[in-house]
Every structure is written in structure tokens, then in C-alpha cells.
Amino acid sequence: MRCCSAQKYLYSLQAALLAKVNGMTEASHDVVIVGAGFGGLELVRGLAGAPVRITMIDKRNHHLFQPLLYQVATTALATSEVAWPVRHLLRRRKDVTTLLANVAGVDRAGKRVLLDDGSAVAYDTLVLATGARHAYFGHDEWEPFAPGLKTLEDATTIRRKILLAFEQAERETDPARRQALLTIAIIGGGPTGVELAGTIAELAHDTLRGEFRNIDTRQTRVVLIEAGERILANFAQKLSAYARSALERLGVTIELGRAVTLCDADGVVFGGTRLPARTILWAAGVASSPAAEWLGAAADRAGRALVEPDLTIAGSPEVFVIGDAALVLRPDGRPVPGVAPAAKQQGRHVAATIKARLAGGIAARPFHYKHAGDLATIGKRAAAIDFGWLKLTGWPAWWLWGIAHIYFLIGFRNRLAVSLSWLWIYVTGQRSSRLITQGDDDKT
């Protein structure tokens, strides 16, 4: 018996050594990540080599580089240049299983993620990195008339609406209806609104010039509406003033201090004034995904889960919420901004926390955010950058903005493709992605 026991022990030891040599050390801790955005992928990277089994769940099959999404909407880039299949990105990570699925809820007591097909995925550690969606301040009925910009589907919808407006204006004989078709209203003066306004103005006044026979696209009105007293409110005052001046030089009309009270098929009402516009774009606000609802956790008015300093949910130290789905406060009480660098920092923090726990650490590890700066581009030759200690405007800021974004793209091919697209637009003003794909709002 002793001989058999010794032989079994030797076999077990040999198997363990072989598994270690082959990089297949037995993992008994299940980490489930919901959301393949910046935070979720950074978490996966941070857990490389850890003794865990990872399940990545997302309702879309691609990771989206959201900072450049507006360039898809405005015909500068193709969808394939800002999004990549999640399975391809994780193909070399044998410790990761990717599931294309919709989450319906979370069973905290049973430690299960519930999917909408009735199945469930068990976890030891759960990380919700599910991002944000549009917020219409209690007026969800505005969404059909004023689409927001958060997904590839949103971007192609907006691109279609903009290009169709020009096509319909070419055939319109009534001057008032034609002008409404050539008026584009953008609601929200943050970075997304500013970037959309500048790029659309260049598209209308430069790229499309001379391509139509019955309309002059230079007569297009781009109106940026902001309820506050200035655009780019999170930037320094002088950068905000520069952005306003740069947009006005591009022909953008800026309306400040008047909130929108109505959006419909015929236009938008703000400050008691109706603006006839057949194209309205929403860049005014976001709300969290339903992560807090799934958990039954406390949330703020925007739906962001209230997390502990270590990014966990109160009473559930095994559950983390990161990125736009979480309200994370800095020491001065200000919230951590919903930007990609913040989500990536949170992903790295959670990865380090999980590894520390597996190594026997029990102390909470508070998250500390390091602000990398604020960036916004204004057309193809201007930008505003606020690093705190350094503030830049004009073409030097535009080049720095471009270099920073190209650096964070995934893969050499995408960096090269985007660089060439931008260079071509910079030199010629022409945009190659002006394709109208079919949709429900198409008219013949």
C-alpha cells in the first residue's frame, strides 16, 4: 500500500511539474469580468500569470476605442480602424474564456452572473466594467430625434443622418425645408460636442464643397448649444475661450446659457427659441449602465454605483465596479472623470488587488487616481490640451493630441491606417468614409 501511495505521489508530482513547465498551473479562482472596454482589458492584462481562470463577458464582440468614435460618425475613419474583435485581442490568453452574452443580473448571495438566456456564470471575484449610455435628463422621448454617440451603431447612425441630410437638401425645392436640412444642432459643449461641431463644419464647408449642384454646402449651419456659460467647462478658462474662437472661425454658431427644453422631428427648442434642424446630435450627458441595479447597490443620480475606496461594493469585497459604471471620489471629493485613462488605472488597481489577495493579503488597497490631462480637438488643425502644468492650443496641440491617440491604438496596422487617414485629410481635406449604409431613417 505504501508503495502504491508513493507511486501515486510521484505521479502527482510529475504531473504538477509538467503543468508548471507548460504554463498550465492549476487555477482554482474564477474571475468574471463584464465589459471589454478599457478597464476590463487592462484588468485582463494585469492578471497575466496569476493563478486564476478569467471569463470575459460582453454583449458586443469588439473592443471600441471610444475617443475616436466621433471620427467614424463624421466620415474621417472607418469602423474597423477604431474597433477590434475581443477574441482576437485575447487569442493568446489561454486562461481567458470570452462569452458573447447579455447580462440580466447578479446573484450576489450565490456569486453568479445571470445571463438573459437563463444560464449563469459562477465567480469568486466579479468585476463590472460596463461603461455608460446616453442620459436625456428625464426626456428619453428625445432619443429618436437626437442620437448620442457611445457605440459603433451610434456612429454609423449619425454618419447616415448627416449625409442623408445633404442628399435630401439637394432634392428639396422649399427654401425653409432646405435650410432645416442644412442645419445641424449639437447639444452639449463638452469635448464630444466640440469635436463633433468642428469636424462637421469642416465636412460641410470643405470636404463636400462642389460635389452638389442644387445646394452650396458652405451654407450649412452648425449650431453648438450649451446650457452652461462656456464650452469645455472642465478646461482652464483661456482654453475654453480659445476653443470657442476656433469653432467660430470654422463657422460654428455657439449658443450658451440656454438649456434645451424640446427635441422633435422638426428641430430643437432652447431658451424659448426654436431652431429648425433636421439633424440633432446629443452630447450633453451620460448615465451609467445598469451595473448598480444588477447588484442592488446604492447609486448616484446618474446610476453610477457607489463604491468603497478600494472600488468594491459595500458588504461584498469580492465585487468590484470600475470605469463609467462607478462613482469614484478623489480625496478632495471630486469624482474621478469618466475617461479612458481613469478606467485603465482602475483596471490595473483591481488586478493588483486580486493578486495581493491570492498571495494572502487582506488589507484594503485604496485606489489613487492620477489625472493625465484633458484633451479636445477642434477640426483638423487645432486642439486644446490641459495638463495642468502645461496648456497648449493650436496646431502643436493638435499634433500632440494625434500622437497620443495613435499611441494608444491597438496594433501597428491600425496606427498606420489612422495616421495615413489623418495625413490625407490634413493635406487634402477629403474624407474617405462617406458611405451611407441603410437604416430605418432612410428615405427614397
Image: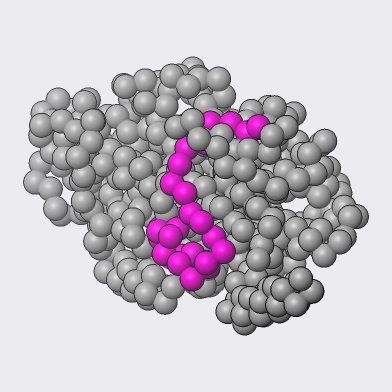
Quadrant in which the N terminus appears: bottom right
- Identify the residue at image location x=23%, y=53%: 434
Which residue is outermost to the right?
363
Q: Is residue 358 magenta?
A: no
- Identify the residue at image location x=43%, y=23%: 142
Using the image as rendered, state which of residue 277 and residue 18 is in the foreground.
18
User: In this picture, is 148 found above or below 237?
Assistant: above
- Identify the residue at image location x=9%, y=46%: 213
User: In this picture, is 61 found above or below 380?
Assistant: above
Whether residue 67 is visible, yes or no, is: no
Using the image as rendered, state which of residue 246 and residue 287 is in the foreground.
287
- Identify the residue at image location x=56%, y=64%: 95
Q: Quadrant of residue 47?
A: bottom right
Q: Could you say where residue 131 lies in the image, as x and y percent from the top left?
A: 57, 43
Quadrant in which the C terminus appears: top left
Q: Could you say where residue 45 lies in the image, as x and y percent from the top left?
A: 61, 66
Q: Could you say where residue 235 lies in the image, as x and y percent from the top left?
A: 66, 52
Boundaries of the magenta span: 83-107
Using the image as rendered, state which of residue 419 and residue 25 is in the foreground.
25
User: In this picture, is 385 found above or below 253?
Assistant: below
Residue 155 in the figure: left or right of residue 398: left
Q: Is residue 87 magenta?
A: yes
Residue 400 in the figure: left or right of residue 352: left
Q: Could you say where residue 91 lies in the image, as x and y percent from the top left?
A: 45, 67
